[in-house]
Structures are given as structure tokens and as C-alpha cells.
Amino acid sequence: MNLSTGIIFCFLILGVRSQGWGTFLREAGQGAKDMWRAYKDMKEANYKGADKYFHARGNYDAAQRGPGGVWAAEVISNARETIQGITDPLLKGMTRDEVQKDSKADQLANEWGRSGKDPNHFRPEGLPDKY
């Protein structure tokens, strides 16, 4: 078991023990919906430079649900970055260094939001208020 899997497993067990499976799973489901909503908004906005804001916002909204939301946001964020590490060089023509740099910046925004910090820190000027 690698370190990240171990950490996620421990976090899952600790989160569930403190509140019960039903609550944890409900929070995780709600957090997953928050992440999906942020992704849909990012695609709809199609606004250059807004990627990190939507990363932070999705993670922030999910984390507000509780430990289940934090867990869902972390799992979804890590999966998304792993998949992009494979697809971005193929579909966007990015180099490995570019992919790693972008992934590191995305993960910073993800962690920022999950920690409860204001996602507007990453909000680009001119992004419509509806987002």
C-alpha cells in the first residue's frame, strides 16, 4: 500500500468512526455533487485563467459538508490529476514538465479549498459574478 492510499484509508476510517457511515456517505455524495457543479461551471464559463478558482471552489464547497465531503474532494481531485497526467500530453501536446507544473498548481488550489480558505483568492478578474 503506498503512502497516499494509506493516508486516505486512515482518513476514511477516522472520519467514519467519528460520525457513522450514513452521515459520512451522505457528506461524500454531497461533496461529489459540489465537485461536479464546479466542473460544470468551469466548462460553462470557459474563462481563461479560471481553472484554479474552480478547483479551489469545488474543494471548498465539498469540504464544507464535513469529513465525507473532504474525503470525496480529495479522491476526485487526485483521480482527476492522475488522469490528466496521462491525457494532457496526448490531447493537449503538453510536455511532462508542463503537466507536472500544472498538476502541482491544481493541487495547491485543491488543498487551499479543502482547508477552508477562501477560493476567491484564485478568482480571476472579470469572471462573471454568477460563478
Image: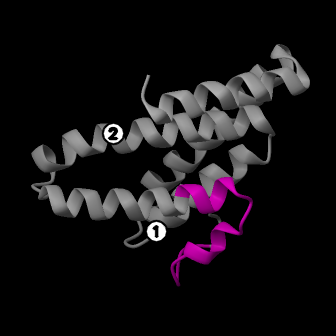
Tell me the tag on residue 50: 1
Side of 117 relative to 32 (left or right) = right
* Residue 13 picture location, percent across and down: 73, 22
Q: Position of residue 23 (x, y in %)?
A: 85, 22
The residue located at (70%, 57%) in the rendering is 115
Residue 110 pos. (x, y %): 55, 55
The residue drawn where x is 46% and y is 68% is 50
The residue that disc 2 covers is 82
- Say whether residue 42 is left or right of residue 123: left
Which residue occupies 64% across, 67% down?
119
Magenta stretch, residue numbers: 110-128
Against 60, residue 11 (above or below) is above
Would residue 21 appear left or right of 31 to someone viewing this image? right
Residue 55, given in percent of the width and then of the height, sits at 52, 56
Q: Where on the picture, by quarter, is residue 103?
A: bottom left
Above or below, 131 against 33 in this view is: below
Give SS at disc 1. Answer: loop
For the C terminus, give its image quadrant: bottom right
User: Do callouts 2 and 1 mark residues in contact (Cβ within 8 Å)?
Assistant: no
Q: Circle 1: is it few (<14), some (14-19), or many (20+) Cα within 10 Å?
A: some
Q: In this view of the protein, which residue sits in the foreground, 1 or 48? A: 1
First-in-chain label (2 vs 1): 1
Image quarter hosting the N terminus: top left
Residue lying at the far right of the rendered structure:
19
Q: Quadrant of residue 96?
A: bottom left
Q: Is residue 72 magenta?
A: no
| Residue drawn at (43%, 59%) of the image | 106
Give the residue type that dot 1 points to: Ala
